Amino acid sequence: MLPNPKLELINSPSKSGEEIQYLFQGQSAGEIPHEEFEGKRETTVILRNGKQRIIFTGLGKKEKLSSVIVREATGVAIRQLLSIGAEEITLNLLGLSDHLASAVEGALLAAYHFDDFKPADRKRKNSLKILRFMVLNSKSEEMQSALLRGKIFGESINHVRHLGNLPPNEVYPERMAEESIKLAMKWKLRCHIWDEKDLIKEGFGGILAVGKGSKSPPRFIELEYQGGKKNQKPIVVIGKAVTFDTGGISIKPAASMEEMKYDKMGGCAVLGIMQAASRLKLPLNIIGLIPSVENMPSSNAYRPSDLVKSYDGKMIEVLNTDAEGRVILADAIAYARIHLKPEWIVDFATLTGAMIVALGTRRAGVFSNQDSLRDLFCIAGHQSGDLVWPMPVGDEYDEQIRSEIACVKNTGGRDAGSCTAASFLKTFAEETPWVHVDIAGTATTAKALPCIEKGSTGFGVHLTIEALESWTKKN
Ligand code: BES
Ligand code: MN
Ligand code: ZN
């Protein structure tokens, strides 16, 4: 269920720290034995007072305090309070009013729980109904807009997570298209969908090839937000949405195949980014593109050795049908380059298992054909908490994917699997500034994070908004 608590701002009764006593009638924080609670990150202590509970949540070292730390500490506290049945929570931000937006976001992220399909008697019984934040000046415009900003981030990311957690018999390419239309109506975006007939007519050979093994037909989705001037060049945000990746004819082993329902997270992230950009009224023109397919083996599926013509006419030699993400992204990137003439392109994709080998599950790899664009995303990663690390692209990898009989092969062997995948995409960006974020590891989490339960994480929304905002400031 998507949490939707009533959000309120109230004034702190004092400026010092007396508010603790006000809340807790007589007992102050000073009475918590230091051995019991040192204020370390991801630790809490709960005190009782009749029906009331007070939780203290650790922020770690003062010198290291940041928005991300406030968000996570809030998440830890909220998750714990919800697990003991709380429905009404007041967060005292003490001296941390500057971090209000992060606290709101953390609370909303922590309140999301995926139990729609559980039997009623095993669903969580309580839900967060009222969420109050105690700040110094609750009526100020600054506090009001911080509250809204946190709400926008929390809701956009939760929406991404929820769509991601839904199973592939619920979310297939047509459903991705329906969700996009719904989103566009709600947040005033323009939306255009290419169905399989349109895709044939207009030569989206990559999307068609990967999609044709499935009874569920492919879709290509375009969402447009116009927050800038009419003639201002757009920024294009692309997301891989393979609603289920069996591997196709190059079929994956059964173990863990169920995780491939998350192979749509790049596309889901684009929906979150478009929602957040529109609600935050960014002064930019942004176009979201989502190629969506189901990668299935069948008598109609594409095969190893097929030669596929991408949107810009480049021929792709298919060596492994499980390297399908790059084949559908090729069409989307080429379409963006040719028709949208963007300022720059960013794509999000759960593209390679090799990315997890290289960086693990908490940091995504960032590849780009322009150093300044890569830096923009690396800095945004640090600020947003969507952690990333720079990865290389270069001629040395191009060689690995050069085809003897076509333009490029869709695999480059075992070595540097994430880099050769990026190099493949770079071929379709040509001279257009482009950045690729491989979220194979970070799109999901196998165990709960401070704000995020097991399942999809919504990675990329915060990162991209942060990047867009700092790019706007510089340009
Ligand atoms: N969706 C997978 C990548 C993936 C693997 C994401 C594990 C998350 C967790 C992608 O389509 C894929 O299958 N990639 C292959 C490429 C290979 C055949 C060149 C891979 O990584 O094994
Ligand atoms: Mn695959
Ligand atoms: Zn895939």
Image: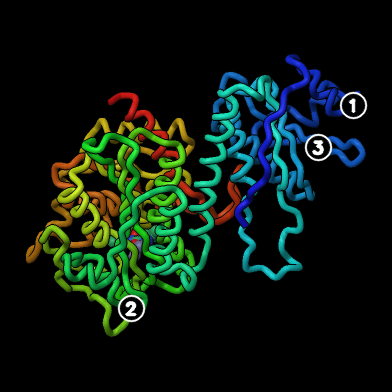
Say left or right for 149 vs 13: left
Query: Is 205 or 226 nearer to us in this picture?
Result: 226
Q: Position of residue 24 (x, y in %)?
A: 86, 28
The answer to which quarter of the image holds residue 323 is bottom left
Which amino acid type is marked by label 2? Pro
Residue drawn at 30 percent across, 62 percent down: 220
CB under 8 Å between discs 1 and 2 = no
Mark 1, secondary structure of its residue: loop
Q: CA distance from mark 1 to mark 2?
A: 66 Å
Ligand 1 quadrant assignment: bottom left
Label 3 belongs to which residue? 46
Question: Residue 303, relative to residue 362: is it above or below?
Answer: below
Q: Position of residue 463 (x, y in %)?
A: 42, 39
Nearer to us: label 3 or label 1: 1
Nearer to us: label 1 or label 2: 1
Outermost residue toward the top in this view: 16
Outermost residue toward the left in this view: 405
Residue drawn at 53 percent across, 57 percent down: 162
Label 1 belongs to which residue? 25
Q: CA distance from mark 3 to mark 1?
A: 15 Å
Residue drawn at 24 percent across, 60 percent down: 413
Q: CA distance from mark 2 to mark 3?
A: 53 Å
Question: Residue 228, relative to residue 396: is it above or below?
Answer: above
Label 2 belongs to which residue? 297
Q: Earlier in the sequence, mark 1 or mark 2?
A: 1
Q: Can residue 24 be seen?
A: yes
Mark 2, secondary structure of its residue: loop
